[in-house]
Amino acid sequence: MKSMLFTVLLTFATTAPLWAQQAKRSRADESSIVFQDISVIPMDTERMLPHQTVLVRDGKIAEVGPAKSARLPPGATRIDGRGKFLLPGLADMHTHVDRAEMLPLFLAAGVTTVLNMGLASPQFITKTRDDIVKGKIAGPRIFAAFMIDGPGDPGPEFVPLCASDARAAVDRAKLEGYDFIKAYQRLDPEMYSAVLDQAKKQHMAVVGHIPTAVGLEQTLAQGQVMIAHGEEYYKTYFHDAPEDARIAPAVELTLHAGAYVTPNLSFFATLTRTVSDPKSWDQRLAAPDMAVLPPDLRGKWLGARPSKASDRFVPELATLKKLTLAMQNAGVPLLAGTDTPANLIPGSSLVDDVEQLVGAGLTPFQAISAATRIPGQFIHQYVPGSEDFGTVTPGKSADLIVLAANPLLDVQNLRRPLGVMTRGHWREDHELQSLAQKPVAGYARTVVLEAAFQSTLEKGTVTDAIREFQSRANPGDRLPEAFVNAVGYEMANAHRLETAIQVFAFNAEQYPESWNTYDSLAEAYANGGQSDLAILNYRQSLALNPKNTAAAAFLVKALGMTPLQK
């Protein structure tokens, strides 16, 4: 039941006039901005303060107090807050976005802080972050983790060869400016211990997965401060089974260790829905908001579409929701995080995650805390010298969002802020949307090329499809690698193996520097019984990526070699 206070405030919010006037700036004091007569949700405790004035000066919250007694500095920018709600900017504590052109998507959704959880480019960690701080580009505050893993599936993560190599990787990450070390699931106990020990010496906190060979108990006992997915508990401590009896001891171990947890329910709920109903993925890919996603990422989403329906994740999702609620009730600090852009759009998916937390049984205040106050607490605790953020209180960084309705009544009200402030820089909705939409026209042109290629392929041959693409393309244009790869696998799954081989070969011609194009082509040749061509392309893939263990395994078997020693 809503309290009388909330009912009165809701009535006030719905009857007050809309955004009454544009912000007025005077040259007398450009460093100060005032939100006048606004309802503040400070997020330090569960409360709302109506009719407040909030003064921002030099990028920080200077004062918060009743509007009727506020003394405003002359010449400050004044923003009319009547009927509006002010709260801290949101934080997505699990992303993998590392492209500058995608960062405005976070701001447009009210996300003012992100934690990149691995695989970001060196340019992103250095220049992009620096450009944001200097105001050269628009984006959220960025923290970043350096990923260290054991041998296995190929990828760009760092794989140490020995304990001293693992320690050197931690030192390197510190020098390059990373804030955290991310431990991944294939680390063996010796490597894991070396990473944790060296990270402590470098005053870097370790976050990430629960390494399978290490287990939950040792992961927490050795000092990992955050578990990046609720799913990690299920895969390790729950032994991949919906064992509700293990929820309480898992919560107790985590609480005793003082670790944070990012349940990551938004990603897992999307995965469960997609696998249960692949047609829902087709509908998602056709949604209007997909236009803001770069075409190569859309190609990866297309490639992730399951070929047949399965309810295999449904029991796990139910268990993860129970685990999340039990952790909240016990006092384990939870962090909102999405894993975007893996099947979720940057920015708006953070509200999806908050909604999933509410769906698991958290109150709106508890769920929003996981996206505001608790991330601020986590960063302040583990990143020395970082700015304080996460609440609307004096001294905190002025990372703020203005909403048209109260999110404590319905977290859907977090969507589409009227304006967003980052470190004292105020942007209204129209500016945020303009920034987010800026690259879309270029994306649309690539989508047209993709559609023409796929449509021609359905009616004719690969040669016809390539000719159609080339007739429309500008010099230097390439179809996105992930898109072409996904089309190739569509052909293979439709038992059109010869067509799939031709598609993969075209992709390898487009991207001769990519190990994955040769890997897909080699796999198709192998499935077609053309082992000599499979060997040739697996060798090329392995030369480009020595960590491609699948290529190495095929070559060992095909060439009759003694298995390689691990």
Image (tube, helix red, strand yellow):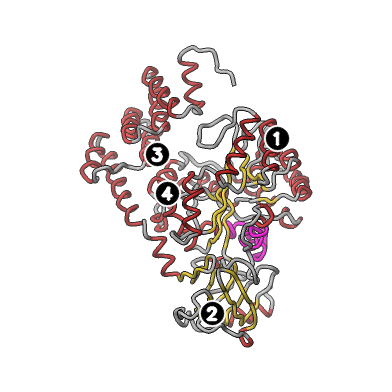
Eye-nearest disc, 2 or 4? 2
Kind of residue sitting beneath label 3: Ala
Could you classify mark 3 by the number of other residues whose Cα lies within 10 Å: few (under 14), some (14-19), or many (20 or more)?
Answer: many
Q: Give the Cα distance between marks 3 and 4.
A: 14 Å
Residue bearing mark 4: 282
Residue 421: x and y, percent?
52, 68
Q: Nearer the viewer, residue 146 or 207?
A: 146
Give, as a single range, the part of the protein colored magenta: 351-377
**Which mark is drawn over residue 81?**
2
Secondary structure at badge 4 equals helix
Seen at 49% across and 67% down, the residue is 416
Query: Which badge, 2 or 3, is on the more N-terminal residue?
Result: 2
Secondary structure at badge 1 equals helix
Residue bearing mark 1: 193
Residue bearing mark 3: 486
Eye-nearest disc, 2 or 3? 2
Q: Nearer the viewer, residue 459 or 354?
A: 354
Kind of residue sitting beneath label 4: Asp
Q: In the figure, 444 relative to 214: above or below?
A: below
Seen at 27% across and 45% down, the residue is 452
**For residue 51, which quarter of the picture?**
bottom right
Kind of residue sitting beneath label 1: Ser
Q: Give the Cα distance between marks 1 and 4.
A: 44 Å
Q: In the figure, 84 relative to 472: above or below?
A: below
Could you classify mark 2 by the number of other residues whose Cα lies within 10 Å: few (under 14), some (14-19), or many (20 or more)?
Answer: many
Query: Which badge, 2 or 1, is on the more N-terminal residue?
Result: 2
Secondary structure at badge 2 equals loop
Residue 10: x and y, percent?
60, 78
Could you classify mark 4 by the number of other residues whose Cα lies within 10 Å: few (under 14), some (14-19), or many (20 or more)?
Answer: few
**Is residue 315 visible in the rendered structure shown here?**
no
